[in-house]
Image (cartoon, grey):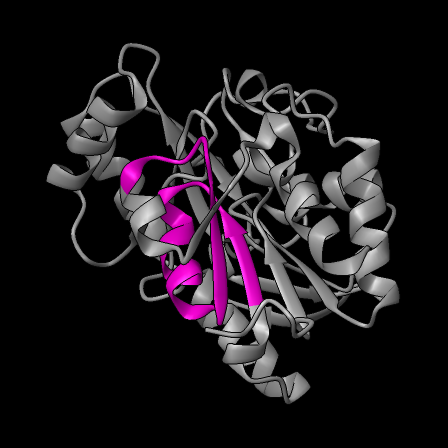
Amino acid sequence: MSSNSKLPQLIAIDVDGTLARSDGSISHRTCESIEKARKADSKIVIATGRPWLVAFDSVEKLGGVDFVVCSNGAMTVELPSERVLEDIYLPQDLPTSLVEHLRKEIPGICFAYEFTRGVKAEKGFAERLPPGVPLGPPIDNVLELDPRPVRKILTWHEKFDLPDFMIHIKNTVNAKVDIASSGLTFLELGPPKVNKATALTKLTMRLNIRAEDTWAFGDEQNDIEMLKWAGCSYAMENAESSVKDAADFIAPSNDEDGVAATLENLFN
């Protein structure tokens, strides 16, 4: 673990439940702490399960970061150029076969497809996103013909809460996809063996930064690999116990601006 007296060369930060408050806002205090870290030459990486379309909303609120790892590691974007460094998709025929299988096994299930820079979604998805996220009108059936490659399948069910729905999905889906939750009320079915840590490993190799010279902040199950990977990691106070167990330290909760409170001790 890196010493707190040594400035991290890269800081990876989750969004929902970590950087953002429970109402989806990002405080002025948090924006200021990120700006100070960047001025001290620490690379700031937003590392989120959100698709690029939704993740970019956080970047705009912050006033800028250096990189975004989104879609749980399937896409990495350099900013401000928006150059795509990593771009991983599901196999071409898998989305259709998987959606058909899940509809047969779990009647009433709903879906959205995530593409490179957009999403098409059935009714009910918009209400599950943070306020203000741009999304077109709902479609009747996600299987409507569309030539774009699918990065992730997003799925939800009006009659199940997320933990019960996760059990149903795990009992139905095989190892062809990775099942994740990023703090919003839907599940994400993405490429297997792809997560925030795998994307950050590739990014730090590109930047010639050692893992021991990195920090990470997170609160959800999809942050565990990243927290274990980082040289110094913080789980938020609002995280569940398994996430806290994966981290080196506990930061104040997201509603207490825990990321900012921690960074202020380092960069002030």
Give the vertical position of 204 relative to 226 (above or below): below
Direction from residue 135 to residue 186 in the image, left or right: left
Q: Which segment did they paint magenta?
A: 215-241
Q: Residue 11 appears at what percent x and percent y?
A: 64, 63
Give the vertical position of 8 relative to 152 (above or below): below
Q: Residue 219 appears at what percent x and percent y?
A: 45, 41
| Quarter residue 167 falls in | top left
| Quarter residue 19 falls in | top right
Q: Residue 244 appears at what percent x and percent y?
A: 35, 45
Residue found at x 80% / y 36%: 29
Question: How many marks do you count on the picture?
Answer: 0
| Quarter residue 241 falls in | top left
* Residue 195 visible in image: no
- Is 118 contained in the magenta span? no
Direction from residue 117 to residue 87 in the image, left or right: left
User: Which residue is outermost to the left?
Assistant: 171
* Residue 34 visible in image: yes
Q: Residue 34 appears at what percent x and percent y?
A: 78, 52
Quadrant of the drawing holding the N terminus: bottom left
Residue found at x 66% / y 34%: 257
- Is 239 contained in the magenta span? yes
User: Which residue is outermost to the top?
Assistant: 159
Residue found at x 24% / y 32%: 166
Foreground residue among 3 and 247: 3
Direction from residue 5 to residue 180 in the image, left or right: left
Foreground residue among 11 and 110: 11
Foreground residue among 201 and 239: 239
Give the vertical position of 194 relative to 105 (above or below): below
Give the vertical position of 242 relative to 206 (above or below): above
Quadrant of the drawing holding the C terminus: bottom right
Residue found at x 52% / y 22%: 125
